Image (cartoon, rainbow, N blue to C red):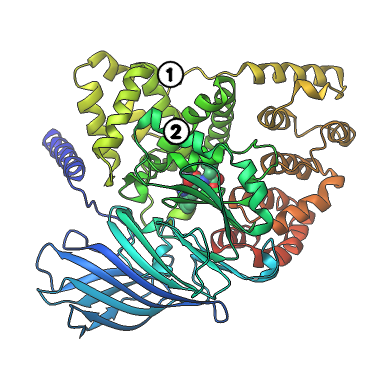
């Protein structure tokens, strides 16, 4: 009897996995919508941007496909003021119900539809505190003269500025008309203008179906400069030239990416440099990557970020995670692709260094989370949690090393052919982890039991921690830094020929190799030689400031304060505020700094820091 039950359980588990693999619209725990019944296909968005009231107002006209003849359609909203809803070409006034607000999920918006209705139009306003939107005063911009607005929709913030079926498993094309003050330029994740329009009205078209988290808008005193035939940068005028210089390799990157995994399907590839409060390094909005100005190191040492966001044009934007539980399909593939682009353009030693740094941060993270922590599994289970808090670097680095281990086992030529076909055959589709695994099995493993045995798929995807048999990961450059540091510690002498640790990644590795127990005198010796406190490289600054906080190295303190006030990048802010909070004195200082800094941060940063400092 007991065995029968176990068998039945296993069978039903296998069936549910299969069902999931076969369907395009898998259940998404982070959306109220029911796309298996009624799904959106196209959006006409018409919005006016009001910098005085910090409100977007207008309408979203959705084209629907009613798959089951349903009498209602459900959208996601959060903090939206719904003014009116009509359906059909006759603009029939429709009844609608807003559900009870749920934390971070917002409210469902259920609209009654008639069987013949192909359209639903929602008239609405955003709230001034809308989580996706950051409204900047002129003083918070580089030029200090004009206000600025930008959106950040990933993961589930699109619903705070557009009523939508806010799931990455649902794709739609869009057109938009955006009205802004005449002096400002508007840009979206679509075909973009290169000059200001005298009327302040802009029209956009995205003809490829995209998920809602890739909806994006930026408005400001923005100018354009070409960096190649199909690439260019947008930035505030004072930043434009340095941005174009820093990202001069964009065109070569697109070429390199195409030579690896097939044609770039989106037309142009441009990049917008945002004001420093932008909460991420980069965001892969289609046709227009949004980027933090903290990558403008002045020496092109951080441009792998562009390789990363560009790679998302395949992994993420072309083939998309169907739910946030499949987030590693977006980020793990992208880190793999990013390192392949870096290797092609900047050589193997550079790519190896990034790989070693990646493994170090993965080990550190799993150490912190605990090797049996369920959140260290690649396939996530984030239901009931805000995906912005639940998703982690596991998706990036464990995802990377899983793919790297398949490359090792199958051989690079075979794996590259597989990946190229994977992107081509799933173009403009959203898929689950199980869809990917069954494709992997069909195309790569089915006729090769030896290979299948080598790759520990279940360990990588469904079990916590790092599986055994990790590929060998080494960097000669880092090995030589290890021996430099070892000798320094043995001799107690921290003077060194700085040209032996010259590139940004080498310096980053060097800082991380220094022990927390390093004396203040030796911190001073190192700083005098390398000038880390005054570095212009944000990764180096962050690593050095962390060490400075842990060791109590006072000369860095004013620089740390300045960095925290101006930079809004979550990845830097969270560890720095956490490190400060480790002592009562540090926590007091953190709170003082935060009071000044908080207005410069986007909601995805300040929501997380509020929790650290509460
Ligand atoms: N898509 C992410 C940013 C993101 C992730 C936004 C999750 C919201 C929720 C982007 O591609 C990314 O990974 N950015 C990294 C860049 C890095 C890995 C080069 C970042 O911001 O640090
Ligand atoms: Zn990414």
Q: Nearer the viewer, mark 2 or mark 1?
A: 2
Between 499 and 260, the residue placed more toward the observer is 260
Of 363 and 412, which appears nearest the observer?
412
Question: For the point 21% across and 60% down, which residue is it?
Answer: 35
- Horizontal and vertical percent position of residue 129: 52, 73
Q: Which mark is residue 162?
A: none
What is the C-alpha distance between the residues marked 2 and 1?
34 Å
Q: Residues within 10 Å of mark 1 (few under 14, many from 20)?
A: few
User: Quadrant location of residue 145?
Assistant: bottom right
> Residue 272 location in percent, x, y?
54, 53
The residue positioned 66% from the left and 21% from the top of the image is: 478
- Residue visible at 54% across and 75% down in the picture: 182
Residue 203, by quadrant, is bottom left
Other residues around mark 2 within 10 Å, as few (<14) / some (14–19) / many (≥20): some
The image shows residue 166, relative to residue 493, as above or below, that is: below
| Foreground of the two, 306 or 524 | 306
Residue corresponding to mark 1: 469
Q: Is residue 603 left or right of residue 573?
A: left
The residue shown at (39%, 33%) is: 258
Q: Secondary structure at mark 1?
A: loop
Whether the residues at callouts 2 and 1 have beta carbons within 8 Å, the answer is no
Q: Is mark 1 within 8 Å of ligand 1?
A: no
Secondary element under disc 2, as helix, strand or loop, is helix
Q: Residue 579, position in %: x, y?
A: 70, 48
Q: Is residue 205 above or below residue 475?
A: below
Q: Is residue 217 visible?
A: no
Residue 255, label in figure: 2
- Specify which label sits upstream in the sequence, 2 or 1: 2
Q: Is residue 220 left or right of residue 382?
A: right
Q: Is the residue 350 above or below the residue 61 in the image?
A: above
Can residue 47 be seen here? The reply is yes
């Amino acid at each position: 009897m007991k065995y029968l039950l176990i068998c039945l359980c296993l069978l039903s588990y296998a069936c549910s996995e299969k069902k999931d693999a076969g369907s395009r619209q898998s259940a998404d725990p982070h959306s109220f919508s029911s796309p298996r019944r009624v799904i959106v296909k196209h959006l006409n968005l018409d919005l006016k941007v009001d910098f005085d009231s910090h409100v977007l107002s207008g309408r979203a006209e959705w084209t629907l496909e009613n798959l089951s003849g349903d009498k209602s359609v459900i959208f996601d909203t959060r903090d939206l003021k719904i003014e009116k809803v009509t359906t059909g070409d006759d603009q029939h006034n429709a009844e609608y119900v807003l559900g009870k607000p749920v934390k971070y999920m917002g409210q469902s918006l259920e609209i009654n539809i008639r069987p013949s209705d192909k359209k639903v139009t929602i008239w609405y306003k955003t709230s001034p505190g809308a989580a996706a939107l950051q409204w900047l005063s002129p003083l918070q911009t580089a030029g200090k003269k004009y206000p600025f607005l930008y959106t950040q929709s990933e993961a589930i913030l699109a619903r705070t500025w557009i009523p939508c079926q806010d799931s990455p498993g649902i794709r739609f094309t869009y057109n938009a008309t955006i009205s802004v003050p005449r002096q400002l330029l508007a840009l979206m994740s679509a075909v973009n203008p290169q000059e200001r329009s005298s009327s302040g009205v802009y029209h956009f078209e995205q003809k490829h179906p995209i998920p809602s988290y890739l909806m994006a808008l930026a408005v400001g005193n923005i100018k354009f400069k070409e960096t190649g035939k199909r690439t260019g940068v947008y930035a505030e005028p004072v930043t434009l030239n340095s941005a174009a210089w820093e990202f001069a390799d964009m065109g070569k990157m697109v070429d390199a990416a195409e030579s690896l995994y097939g044609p770039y399907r989106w037309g142009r590839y441009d990049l917008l440099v945002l004001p420093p409060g932008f909460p991420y390094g980069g965001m892969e909005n289609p046709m227009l990557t949004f980027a933090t100005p903290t990558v403008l190191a002045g020496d092109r040492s951080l441009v792998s970020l562009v390789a990363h966001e560009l790679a998302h044009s395949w992994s993420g934007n072309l083939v998309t995670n169907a739910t946030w539980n499949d987030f590693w399909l977006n980020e793990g593939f992208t880190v793999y692709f990013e390192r392949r682009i870096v290797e092609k353009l900047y050589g193997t030693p550079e790519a190896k260094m990034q790989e070693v740094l990646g493994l170090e941060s993965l080990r550190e993270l799993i150490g912190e989370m605990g090797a049996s922590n369920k959140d260290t599994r690649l396939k996530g289970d984030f239901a009931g949690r805000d995906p912005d808090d639940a998703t982690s670097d596991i998706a990036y680095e464990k995802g990377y090393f899983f793919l790297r281990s398949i490359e090792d086992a199958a051989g690079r030529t075979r794996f590259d052919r597989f990946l190229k076909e994977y992107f081509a055959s799933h173009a403009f589709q959203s898929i689950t982890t199980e869809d990917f695994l069954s494709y992997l099995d069909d195309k790569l493993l089915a006729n090769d039991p030896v290979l299948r045995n080598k790759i520990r798929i279940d360990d990588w995807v469904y079990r916590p921690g790092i599986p055994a048999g990790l590929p060998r990961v080494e960097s000669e450059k880092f090995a030589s830094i290890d021996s430099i540091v070892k000798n320094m510690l043995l001799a107690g002498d921290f003077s060194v020929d700085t040209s032996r640790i010259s590139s940004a990644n080498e310096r980053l590795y060097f800082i991380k190799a220094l022990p927390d127990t390093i004396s203040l005198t030796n911190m001073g010796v190192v700083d005098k030689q390398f000038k880390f406190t005054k570095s212009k490289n944000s990764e180096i600054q962050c690593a050095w400031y962390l060490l400075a906080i842990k060791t109590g190295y006072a000369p860095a303190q004013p620089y740390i304060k300045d960095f925290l006030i101006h930079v809004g990048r979550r990845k830097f802010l969270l560890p720095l505020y956490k490190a400060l909070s480790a002592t009562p004195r540090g926590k007091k200082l953190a709170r003082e700094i935060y009071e000044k800094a908080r207005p410069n941060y986007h909601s995805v940063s300040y929501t997380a820091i509020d929790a650290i400092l509460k």
